[in-house]
Image (spheres, helix red, strand yellow):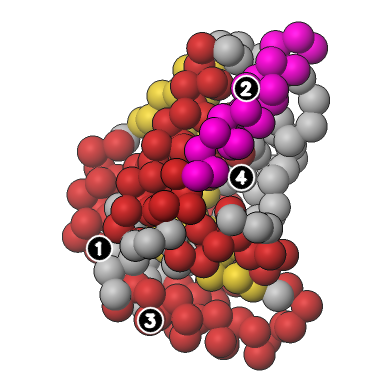
Amino acid sequence: MLRTFFVNFFAYIWAVLVTPLILVGLLSRKLLRRVAKIVVFGVLFIARWVGGIKIEIHNARYAFVAIASKHPIVASKHMSILETGILLAFVPNSFFIIKRELMWIPIYGWAFWRLGMVPVDRRAGATNMNALAANVRRKIESGGTLVMFPEGTRVKPGAGVKIRGGIMHIARALQLPILPVGLDTGLYCPKHGKIRPGTANVWFEQILPHDATAEEIAAAIGKHSA
């Protein structure tokens, strides 16, 4: 429990310390992306040297080439805050679909907006999905790469992969292939519970076509996930 306490403590201190830097970064998106990477590397540094969690990325070269040449939707398992930072830092010009409530957080919510994050109201149904696809199209045409957590929320290790319909709607509407990402970060930095030292793995899997089924996406994401 001491490890968990100190990781959370230093992460909180880090969040406070970088707040002025984020405010400066709001002046331009390019500058804010650099600031965001500094924030992420700080969090990963705390995870490594306080929490004892190493990060290993598998098939990184394949993923980098696939992202640059095929402009896929990056579809990741979601177990921990760690993969949010890893994907933000690794995927060029990445933007996420996030709960609109996160946009209301002072300063950090402004940063999410400036970075091009797409807020979604899950209660709006199909009408919202059509507007969402149009919003995503505009950002991709401007050079962005969409990162999605197709299960919609963080899950516990061993819970299996349950794909919501949003990713398939967007992939088919925009004719975008899908780059699945599996991981086991939840074993070391779970949503709830104590942090454990070890090597957290992130696997970029083989790219899928835009018309992949929910079962195919789930199988690919779950191939190496905990």
Determine if residue 10 is in view. Answer: yes
- Cα gap from disc 4 to disc 2, whole angstroms: 23 Å
Tell me the residue at 52%/49% (across/down).
Answer: 76
Residue 30: percent from the left, percent from the top?
A: 30, 58
Does the magenta-highlighted stretch encompass residue 77?
A: no
What residue would you read off at disc 2? 10
Tell me the residue at 33%/46% (across/down).
Answer: 34
- Cα gap from disc 1 to disc 3, whole angstroms: 17 Å
- Amino acid type at image mark 1: Lys
Frontmost residue, 220 versus 59: 59
Mark 4 surroundings: few (<14), some (14-19) or many (≥20) residues within 10 A:
many
Where on the picture, by quarter, is residue 16? top right
Does the magenta-highlighted stretch encompass residue 9?
A: yes
Mark 2 in CB contact with mark 3 (< 8 angstroms): no
Depicted 206 relative to depicted 177: above or below: above
The secondary structure that dominates the magenta segment is helix
What residue would you read off at disc 1? 70
Q: Disc 2 vs disc 1: which is toward the camera?
A: 2
Q: Which mark is residue 138?
A: 3
Frontmost residue, 218 versus 131: 131
- Amino acid type at image mark 3: Arg
Residue 136: percent from the left, percent from the top?
A: 45, 76
Residue 154: percent from the left, percent from the top?
A: 69, 46
Mark 4 in CB contact with mark 3 (< 8 angstroms): no
What residue would you read off at disc 4? 78
Which tag, 4 or 1, sits closer to the chain's start?
1
- Cα gap from disc 2 to disc 1, whole angstroms: 39 Å
